[in-house]
């Protein structure tokens, strides 16, 4: 069972607050030599890392609110890498995970990938192989965070919509023509056009395709 007790953490950075956009790699491996080596490898290409000896240490430290990925050993003392993956999923944490293991097998790798892992590297692996996987995972997380920020901003803009504008957008989202939306709402087609135009402006939509995409993002 995963513990939340706090433990020591080693960080491969200067003791300063990092910018929110600066990526970081979280390395979890009970082998000191392995995690030190991984930390040095990442530092050699300018990537910050935070090193942990167990899943408990990672959970106790808290996950950084920055673009990140997790390099996670499959077999660990206490909770395993797969158990941590499951726990993070339950917590709603969507950090990309790269599994590393000296005891991997096909069923385990399939299970990890189906649960959302972005890569599965059996030891020993080439340094460039790991770096490629890390860079790809950080790119994925950066894009996810950007999309999340866009949705937050879109929801803020959507607060300006009137109930009738939301009704019209629901019709647009269903693929209905203006005259069909007008019929369903019991209003004139020109009224629908006015509400649609106003909603488009409030959501900063640039095209018909853009407004449809934003309607979908808002769940309308």
Image (cartoon, rainbow, N blue to C red):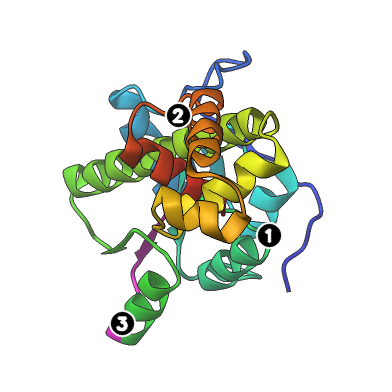
Picture quarter with the N terminus:
bottom right
Q: Tag 2, which secondary structure?
A: loop
Q: Nearer the viewer, residue 218 or 108?
A: 218
In the figure, is residue 90 to the left or right of 7?
Answer: left
Percent of width and height locating residue 106? 28, 83
Q: Is residue 62 visible?
A: no
Assess whether mark 1 and mark 2 are in contact (beta carbons under 8 angstroms). no
The residue depicted at 41 percent of the width and 57 percent of the height is 176
Residue at the disc numbered 1 = 91
Single out the mark in the foreground, 3 or 1: 1
Q: Is residue 46 above or below residue 60?
A: above
Q: Is residue 9 above or below residue 157?
A: below
Label 2 or label 3, whichever comes before in sequence order: 2
Residue at the disc numbered 2 = 23
Residue at the disc numbered 3 = 105
Q: Nearer the viewer, residue 1 or 160?
A: 160
Q: Nearer the viewer, residue 90 or 194?
A: 194
Instruction: Estimate the spatial distance between the alpha carbons at disc 2 and disc 3, rounded to whole Å.
Output: 30 Å
Q: Is residue 129 visible?
A: yes
Q: Which residues are magenta?
A: 97-106
């Amino acid at each position: 069972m995963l513990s939340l007790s706090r433990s020591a953490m080693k960080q491969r950075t200067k003791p300063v607050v990092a910018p929110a956009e600066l990526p970081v790699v979280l390395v979890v491996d009970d082998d000191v030599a392995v995690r030190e080596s991984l930390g040095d490898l990442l530092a050699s290409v300018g990537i910050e890392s935070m090193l942990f000896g167990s899943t408990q240490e990672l959970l106790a430290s808290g996950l950084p609110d920055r673009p990140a990925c997790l390099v996670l050993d499959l077999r660990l003392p206490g909770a395993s890498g797969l158990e941590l993956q499951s726990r993070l999923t339950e917590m709603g944490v969507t950090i990309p995970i790269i599994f590393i293991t000296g005891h991997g097998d096909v069923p385990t790798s399939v299970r990890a990938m189906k649960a959302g892992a972005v890569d599965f590297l059996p030891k020993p692996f080439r340094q460039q192989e790991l770096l490629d996987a890390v860079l790809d995972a950080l790119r994925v997380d950066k894009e996810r965070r950007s999309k999340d920020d866009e949705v937050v901003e879109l929801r803020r803009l959507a607060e300006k919509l009137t109930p009738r504008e939301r009704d019209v957008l629901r019709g647009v989202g269903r693929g209905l023509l203006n005259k069909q939306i007008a019929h369903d709402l019991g209003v004139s087609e020109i009224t629908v056009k006015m509400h649609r135009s106003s909603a488009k402006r409030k959501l900063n939509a640039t095209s018909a395709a853009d407004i449809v995409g934003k309607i979908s993002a808002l769940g309308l």
